[in-house]
Structures are given as C-alpha cells and as structure tokens.
Image (cartoon, rainbow, N blue to C red):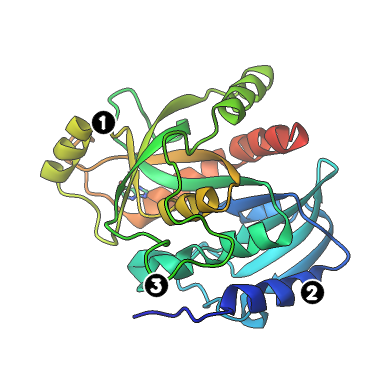
C-alpha cells in the first residue's frame, strides 16, 4: 500500500505553515509514548490536528495523540509531533517519514526523536534512558525507496546519523541535570509482535542494545534532508527472554514511559535550550 503522491509533502507543508504562521520552527521533537505532556509545555502554542494536514493519517495507538504543536520551548521555536505513524499500523515507510519531510520543508534544522524500547544490554533496566548512538534498520523498509522526493538526497551518508556533537551536548545536559543517561545502538523492527527470545539473542549478537518499532524511517528521511538528529530511547522493559521468563505487555511499556517522562522531558528541554 502506498499513500504517497507527487506534491503531497508540499501540500502538507503549505497547510502546516499556514496553520502555524507566523511561527517558524527550527527544531522538531517527535514525542514517543507518554511524552505528550511536553507538548503542553510549549509556549504560545498552536495545535494542528492531523485531520487538517493532507496525507497525515489518524493515529491508532493508545498513548499517541494526533497533532503538531508549534510554539516555543526554552525560548526556541519548535514544533512537536504528538503521535507518530508506525509501520506496524500498516503505514508505509514514506508515510512514517512524512512529518519529518514537512519539518525540513518548514525550515527545521534539528530533529529530536524519542521512543520506547526494550532493553537488550544486560545492565539496562526499565526506566533507563539511552542516548541513541547508532541504529540497525531491520525493518527492511526505507522511506527513500521509490522516486526521489524533491529536496531529498538519493544516497545519503548514514555513517553518523545521530550527530556526534549533539550527543556530546546531550551527555553534558544530562550530567548537569544529574540525569543518568546511557548510550547504545537502537534496532528498529517492523513489529507489532514483540520479539522471540531467539530474535533477541540474534539482535544482541548483531550489536543492538535496545529494540523498538519506530524512529528509523524518520531518521533516514531526516538525514536525506540534511537535518541533524539526536535520539533518546526510554527502556521501558527488558527485552524478551531477559527478564526471567516474564511475558511482555504494552501496559508495562506505557507504565514505565509514564514513570520516567519528567526526567526525559527535563533532558529534552535542556537539550533544546542549547540548540
Ligand atoms: N520490543 C520492541 N519494541 C518495544 C519493546 C520491546 O521489547 N518495548 C517497547 N517497544
């Protein structure tokens, strides 16, 4: 299924630009599970429901709203994406990346992505915050496949997708604010079923520290548009088979995300303030 059509990015951008005028965001924040509250802290906010944006589907997952919120956070003009499009909902990678392309077209230079993930590294506990150092794309989908979107690079470099300088900045903010921040490799899978124990064993050998079902399409599209990216995963649970035989449940994911959301929000505010 393909939801794209030529000119859709431009039409969506025009609709958003008009709705948020005269605001001109320079930072975009993609809010993962439980982080919707951060959108409420945006000052001078205007909310744009997805229903008003061409090409934006309505989210289907509990815990995800469906709106862009533009205004300022820490005095920085930003747009927050509350509710993302997952591949496991049946969206193609192009659609998952549509908001990011719109952000780039609006003039956004820095993308902050957050997500919930299962912890693979032995020392990770539910509630651990992990700065994303790199990713493995095991979704076997790519938002750049197909005709080149105007403004995209055809073959973008992916050797440093999570900007080195921004990671230094994130670690500095974390240490200033006394927020524990680990760093590791995020692996994106299609989902929506959680992994088998054998799959987690495989991912561990592949070098993954955390596993989730989002983020990769957005980051690939951001790099194709020259945006800088910083990403943070909330480890909401230990990955399958590593938690002493306990079964995984979406409820645990939401509860952990809820528990650490203020810490993560604090970290994001601190990072945004320095962008
Ligand atoms: N696996 C995949 N995605 C996830 C998980 C997990 O264990 N936890 C939160 N998102």
Q: Earlier in the sequence, mark 3 or mark 1?
A: 3
The residue furthest left is 198
Res 170 quadrant in image: top right
Residue denoted by label 2: 19
Q: Kindly state the secondary structure of the residue where label 3 is placed.
A: loop
Q: Answer above or below: position of 271 versus 147.
A: above
CA neighbours of label 3 inside 10 A, class few (<14), some (14 to 19), many (20+): some
Residue 202 place in picture, x, y as percent: 15, 38
Residue at coordinates 52% horizontally, 67% vertically from top-left? 149
Quarter of the image holding residue 183?
A: top left
At horizontal 46% and vertical 24% (from top left) the residue drawn is 182
Q: Which residue is mark 3?
A: 91
Q: Earlier in the sequence, mark 3 or mark 2?
A: 2
Q: Quadrant of the N terminus?
A: bottom left
Q: Along the horizontal axis of the image, is 253 left or right of 7?
A: left
SS category of the residue bearing label 1: loop
198 over 191 or under it: above or below: above
Q: Are marks 3 and 2 in contact (CB under 8 Å)?
A: no
**Residue at the spot of label 1:** 207
**Left/right of residue 103 with respect to residue 239 in the rendered view:** right
Graded by Cα atoms within 10 Å as few (under 14), some (14 to 19) or many (20 or more), the crowding at tag 2 reads some
Real-space CA distance between mark 3 and mark 2, rounded to the nearest whole angstrom: 25 Å
| Whether residue 246 is visible | yes
């Amino acid at each position: 299924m393909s939801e794209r059509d030529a000119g859709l990015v431009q039409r969506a951008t025009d609709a958003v630009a008009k709705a948020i005028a005269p605001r001109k965001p320079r930072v975009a924040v993609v809010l993962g599970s439980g982080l919707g509250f951060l959108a409420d802290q945006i000052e001078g906010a205007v909310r744009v429901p997805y229903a008003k944006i061409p090409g934006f589907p309505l989210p289907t997952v509990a815990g995800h709203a469906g709106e862009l919120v533009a205004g300022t956070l820490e005095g920085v003009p930003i747009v927050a994406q509350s509710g993302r499009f997952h591949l496991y909902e049946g969206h193609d990678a192009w659609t998952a990346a549509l908001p990011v392309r719109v952000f780039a077209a609006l003039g956004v230079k820095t993308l902050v992505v957050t997500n919930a993930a299962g912890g693979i590294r032995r020392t990770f506990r539910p509630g651990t915050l992990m700065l994303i150092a790199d990713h493995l794309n095991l979704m076997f989908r790519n938002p750049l496949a197909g005709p080149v979107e105007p403004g995209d690079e055809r073959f973008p470099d992916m050797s440093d997708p999570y900007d080195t300088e921004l990671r230094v900045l994130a670690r500095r903010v974390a240490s200033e604010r006394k927020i524990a921040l680990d760093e590791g490799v995020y692996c994106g899978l299609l989902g929506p079923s959680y992994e088998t124990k054998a799959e987690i064993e495989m991912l561990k050998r592949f070098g993954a520290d955390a596993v989730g079902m989002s983020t990769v399409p957005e980051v690939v599209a951001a790099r194709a548009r020259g945006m800088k990216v910083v990403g943070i995963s909330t480890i909401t649970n230990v990955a399958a088979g590593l938690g002493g035989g306990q079964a995984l449940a979406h409820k645990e994911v939401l509860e952990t995300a809820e528990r650490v959301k203020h810490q993560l929000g604090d970290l994001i505010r601190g990072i945004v303030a320095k962008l």
